[in-house]
Amino acid sequence: MASQAAEDGNQTSSGVTDDYSSWYIEEPLGPEEVQPEGVKPPCQPSVPPALLHTCLASLSLLALLLLALLVRRRRLWTRCGHGRPGLPSPVDFLAGDRSWTVPTAVFVVLFSNLCLLLPDENPLPFLSLKTASNPGSWFIKLLALLYYPVLYYPLAACATAGHRAAYLLGTVLSWAHFGVQVWQRAECPQDPKIYKYYSLLASLPLLLGLGFLSLWYPVQLVQSVRYRIGAGSQGLQPSYSEKYLRTLLCPKKLDSRSRPISKHSLLSRAWACSQHSIYTPQPGFRLPLKLVISAALTGTATYQVALLLLVSVVPTVQKVRAGITTDVSYMLAGFGVVLSEDRQEVVEANLQALHRGAALDLGPSLQSTHPSRQAIVCWMSFSAYQTAFSCLGLLVQQVIFFLGTTILAFLVFVPLLHGRNLLLLRSLESTWPFWLTLALAVILQNMAAHWIFLETHHGYPELTNQRMLCIATFLLFPINTLVGAIVALWRVLLSSLYNTVHLGQMDLSLLPPRAASLDPGYHTYRNFLRIEASQSHPAVIAFCTLLLHAPSPQPRPPLAPQDSIRPAEEEEGRKGSQNRARWGLAYTLLHNPSLQALRKTALSGTKTNGTQP
């Protein structure tokens, strides 16, 4: 019996032990570590990434050298560098007729690589890092920030060269980059970092950009061979400026043509309603290239940040939801993107106003209208700032909205549903006389202001009962002080929400008008408009192009002795045409916004008849 009891006790204890052992799921008993569920070991590619990047870097360097031989450097100064090989420009930002598709695709590819670079432990495959906590890891990432722009430099420069050989090099480069990316994603689609499919989803803009370039360069190569297109599209350069000039000179004809045929149709009404929220390009006007690139980068940044928030929050919420046994499901959805509806329309209106020489109400007036060192720096960093502001603005918006939704849920909705932890409601219950007094004071003041202190005489409101008004103001001063404290808190909250929503919008200052110049984003936007209006004015470009294309006067043979009696009659027509051309050029240059400051100083000392004193 004793042995049987002992056996039963052992079985019971073992059974209890077995039951208790199932409680410790998160802590393994042995020295071996249990791998988390859903996480696979890192994929081992068949071709090392270091070898692929070495081949791509070598190919890019070779393409850059060949492009340098194709592009001839202009003369910087007399007897220096004329006709020698030069480094081609990747993007021509100030050219009005250049295609914006290739620069936009290259910038999207570059930004997508930078997004994939941040969580990567080995940003440069040439150098191997054991752990991410290595002190040299941040230095390697800084080197990678310089490596990827150099890697994609020839891919963008092949489009600006405008040569058949450049299109051939662009085809080879785009196919090589696109093939390597597709090979890596197809061989290792899952990655244990952050989320198993994060690397694949984050590389979608990268694949789209490289796929577009791999199709665009072959099409340009075939067109250049078929139609015998020369080196570049320089012959089409004045088309945008001439079109803009024609639009300014004959706006009525363009407006009559652009009107819809049927004004009362359903489609025309829908189009008229959608024009208030959708940007519609104006005939003859073209948005600057940097603004188009900024819009594309903003969309890419929104996708990358939303994807990062999604893969970071959703798995955590799923794990938390798996351990909840109540019937209430907590849905915390706050992924809302706030964009300006008419940002491009605002930029278009501001640029057109600057083209007309108008002074914009953009805060404190600029000291001068010609380009400066600070304006050039702001113009260079406009697209990068817009991308960074969009990323940070979206992150701050999601954090604030998530915290606000969580606080509202756990302080109001959850206590009401469960009937427990009614902290906020109990505090309101205990202080209801205070809130009722404040509400009654505000309501009574508004009613008294409407019915007692205002009277309408001859259609105009007039102030009456001034003695009662002063008495009420004095008596309600303590209560209005408490109301002012509540209003101050509401003001802080409202300004914080407003600045959070408009953090990614650079054409709107987050500071008062007097301190608008202290806002770095708004300051960058103003100087960006300044450079665009002064360096790429379409009317000035069109007029100067017409002057350059004007036929030059043919050299006349020497006059015979009998014809030299009347030289003044023949020279009169030539001088008249020269004077008309000079007056036209002077009129155009004097109306150039970039020369306003110089024009005022030059004309301040002139007389009425145009002679200098």
Image (cartoon, helix red, strand yellow):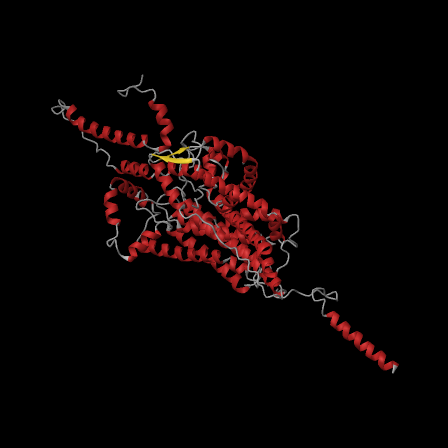
Q: Nearer the viewer, residue 75 or 420?
A: 420
Number of numbered discs present? Answer: 0
- Residue 345 locus on image (x, y percent): 37, 45
Q: Residue at x 35, y 27 (%)?
A: 599
Point out the residue furthest to the right here: 2
The one of 355 and 16 positioned closer to us in this rendering: 16
Q: Residue 514: where, in percent of width, then height? A: 47, 33
Query: Closer to the camera, 380 or 316?
Result: 316
- The answer to whether any part of residue 62 appears in the image is yes
Q: Is residue 304 above or below residue 93?
A: below
State which quadrant residue 225 falls in: bottom left
Above or below 89: residue 319: below
Name the outermost residue toward the bottom: 1
In the picture as drawn, the residue positioned furthest to the top comes out as 613
| Screen quadrant of the C terminus | top left
Q: Is residue 42 visible in the rendered structure shown here?
A: no
- The residue located at (31%, 18%) in the rendering is 612
Image x and y of residue 314, in percent? 56, 60
Q: Quadrant of residue 22?
A: bottom right
Q: Is residue 83 left or right of residue 563?
A: right
Q: Quadrant of the N terminus?
A: bottom right
Where is residue 263 shown, x and y percent of the image? 25, 53
Q: Image height check: is 9 above or below 533? A: below
Question: Which residue is at a point 23% across and 45% down the rendered structure image?
Answer: 253
